[in-house]
Image (cartoon, rainbow, N blue to C red):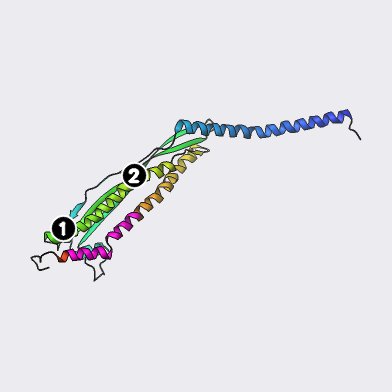
Amino acid sequence: MRPIKGDQNRKDWTNRLFVWSLLLFLMPGRVASANDDRFKADCEKLIGAGKVVVTYTDIVPAEDSSHTIKSLQSMSGKANDAYHSVYGLTHAEPAFRYEINTRWRISPEGQTCMVADVSVKLGFSAMRVYLARELQDSCRKNIVREHELEHVSTWRSHFRIAAKMLEDPLRTAFSQPRYYPSQTQAQADLKPWVEGVLQPFQKQLMNGAAAAQRAIDSPAAYQRVTQRLRTCPPSANGS
């Protein structure tokens, strides 16, 4: 049975109404998506990538000869080691500081893009070389000092090299802007974002430095120092 003309007109009108309704439903999403893409493109073009600067500040270690062997042994955590005498000790306080500056763009709808410019400063708050008070003659004192200065040199070179090696991966990590529904959310995420990037690098740096320090204090290294000390002439107190 063929539909009458009036029924066909009503059917065509219903179909057109459905299509118009569907377009109206989809249009806000398409416009928002286009605005989002345009906002991101403008942001990346105008705001640019995050800037990263990593610097190392050197330090000259202080020397302290006021502590006894027993005192240094306690400071080193080996007070109960009857087979190990501590003639020297190096104490370093590593410093890993950072500063953040942000650049923003905010759309009329409140969308926010943010980049972080990060400045990282590596160095030491303090560094001190302890030489046992009992080391009265220059021969023994110089041998122990040389060993401790290996620790100093390793600390300094490790951090100096790290400052150069950190720049590229940090630039990669902060190369792209981040996007947020609002500036409030961007501000809340800033510190967690930056610390989430920096802390693994800091941990890796400290683990590497600690491993390098342990290598200097290996049994073979101690044996070499002991053998050198035995070549020194007897001191005035007979030691």
Q: Is residue 66 left or right of residue 7?
A: left
The residue stretch that appears in magenta: 208-228
Point out which mark residue 174 bears: none
What amino acid type is highlighted by mark number 1? Asn
Return the residue at label 1: 142
Write down the quadrant of residue 35 in the picture: top right
User: Which quadrant does the N terminus fall into?
Assistant: top right
Let me know if residue 227 is in the magenta part. yes
Q: Horizontal and vertical percent for residue 159?
A: 31, 49
| Residue occupying the far bottom of the picture | 82
Residue found 34% across the figure and 48% down from its top: 162
Alpha-carbon neighbours of circle 1 within 10 Å: few (<14), some, or many (≥20)?
Answer: some
Up-down relation of residue 213 to residue 181 (above or below): below
Marks 2 and 1 sit apart, C-alpha to C-alpha, by 32 Å
What residue lies at 21% left-to-right and 48% top-to-bottom?
60
The answer to whether 135 appears left or right of 4 in the picture is left
Q: Which mark is residue 164?
A: 2
Q: Residue at x 24, y 47 (%)?
A: 59
Q: Secondary structure at mark 2?
A: helix
**Judging from the image, what secondary structure is the residue with disc 1 in?**
helix
Task: Name the amino acid, label 2.
Answer: Lys
The answer to which image quadrant residue 139 occupies is bottom left
Q: Is residue 66 visible?
A: no
Q: Residue at x 31, y 57 (%)?
A: 212
Dot placed on the residue nearer the N-terminal end, 2 or 1: 1
In the rendered image, residue 196, in percent from the top left (x then y), is placed at 43, 48
Residue 200 in picture, x, y percent from top left: 41, 51
Answer whether residue 180 is magenta in the image: no
From the top left corner, tell me how far across and down residue 109 is, in percent.
Answer: 54, 32
The answer to whether residue 30 shows anywhere in this view is yes
